[in-house]
Image: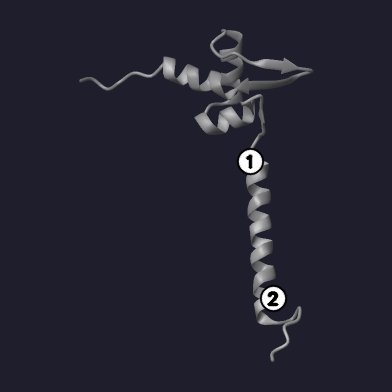
Amino acid sequence: MEIINGKSPEILSFTQTLEELLEAIRKLSDKCSPALNGEKYLSGKDISRILGLSIGTLQVWRDQGIIPYIQITGKILYKESDVIKLLEENYYKAGL
């Protein structure tokens, strides 16, 4: 009967796999923002990265009333649904 301990190849492999999974979960959780009442809120950095816009463009859009936002003590957030709505309202199909 073989004794399996903490230095056994099977245990070492299992431990390494668990560490890799934990790291992957940490990375995913850093990128995800939790939903609040079913709504996901995004920061300006999120919107900038996703849409390829500058922070300055977002500022102009806010000033011109193009995109709705929430501001709490200097922190600005955007509802994901508002961003999707803005994109859909400005979608133009290719000529038929």
Label 2: how many Cα within 10 Å (few below 14, some 14–19, many 20+): few
**How many other residues sit within 10 Å of disc 1, few (<14), some (14-19) or many (≥20)?**
few
Q: Is tag 2's residue or tag 1's residue first in the polypeptide sequence?
A: 2
Residue designated by label 1: 31
Q: Which secondary structure, mark 1?
A: helix
Could you tell me which residue is drawn at 71 percent across and 16 percent down?
71
Q: Residue at x 57, y 28 (%)?
A: 47
Relative to 53, say whether 62 is above or below. Answer: above
Identify residue type, mark 2. Answer: Ile
Is 5 situated left or right of 47 in this image?
A: right
In whole angstroms, how far apart are the C-alphas of marks 2 and 1?
A: 31 Å
Residue extending farthest to the front is 1
Check the image and name the residue furthest to the bottom.
1
State the image coordinates of residue 54 (x, y, percent, origin top left). Answer: 57, 26
Q: Secondary structure at mark 2?
A: helix
Q: Position of residue 34 (x, y in %)?
A: 67, 33
Q: Which mark is residue 11?
A: 2
